[in-house]
Amino acid sequence: MSVEKLLTTARERGAQLGLPYGGALLPAEAWQLRQALPGSVIVDVRSAAEWQFVGVVPEAVRVELRTFPGMVPNAQFVPQLEAQVSKDATVLFLCRSGARSDEAARLAAAAGYREVYNVLEGFEGDRDGEQHRGQVNGWKAAGLPWIQG
């Protein structure tokens, strides 16, 4: 799929979801866009514990939205993001399941980032019938590149 088609799909999905930022991508779409669009950046907003114990997307920028334990909000999230990612970049936010990345996308858009997208389903996706993540949907289940942190 072309970059323009991916962005159009993401924007249409974002409009359907009523998002106040660019749009939303499925994991495979996000990876394809990251590979095809120079200057696009995946920003993983999970906790450092998740990066270490669950795994990470190669070359993703890491900025905690909330810290473990306690999932305490990172008051320096926007300044840390601004220190690592240009406001001109196309930014694809990723978390465990898509909720924190939505929050991060909202914060980034409010801070002046123009091309902001949420990666739906996240890195691990939804739980299966046995309450395990990583099998139903999400980055890992899609077979996309990742490494153990």
Image (cartoon, rainbow, N blue to C red):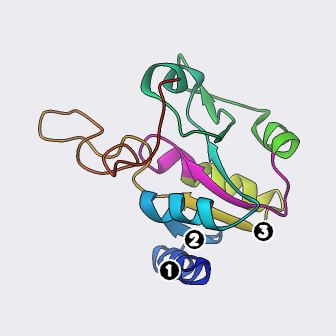
Instruction: Say what amino acid the circle numbered 2 marks.
Output: Gly
The answer to if 87 sits in the magenta stretch is yes
Q: How many marks?
A: 3
Q: Evaluate if marks 2 and 3 touch, with contact meaning CB atoms under 8 Å apart.
A: no
Separation (CA) of disc 2 from disc 3: 11 Å
Near-viewer residue (126 or 28): 28
> Residue 19, how many percent across, how many down?
57, 70
Q: Residues within 10 Å of mark 1 (few under 14, many from 20)?
A: some
**Badge 2 is on which residue?**
23
Q: Residue at x 23, y 48 (%)?
A: 136
- Tell me if residue 19 comes above or below residue 68 in the rendering: below
Residues marked 2 and 1 touching at CB (< 8 Å): yes
- Is residue 52 visible in this depiction of the protein? yes
Separation (CA) of disc 2 from disc 1: 8 Å
User: Over which residues does the magenta segment extend?
Assistant: 85-101
Identify which residue, 45 or 147, lies in the foreground. Answer: 147
Where residue 8 appears, as percent x and y from the top left, is: 56, 83
Task: Write down the residue under mark 3.
Answer: 114
In screen coordinates, is 106 left or right of 8? right
Per the image, the residue denoted by label 1 is: 9
Above or below 52: residue 26: below
**Mark sitting earlier along the chain (2/1):** 1
Mark whose residue sits in front, 3 or 1: 1
Where 43 falls versus 87 (above or below)?
above
| 45 vs 109, nearest the viewer | 45
Q: Earlier in the sequence, mark 2 or mark 3?
A: 2
Q: Position of residue 89 (x, y in %)?
A: 78, 61
Q: Could you say where residue 122 lies in the image, as x and y percent from the top left? A: 44, 48
* Left or right side of 129 for 30: right
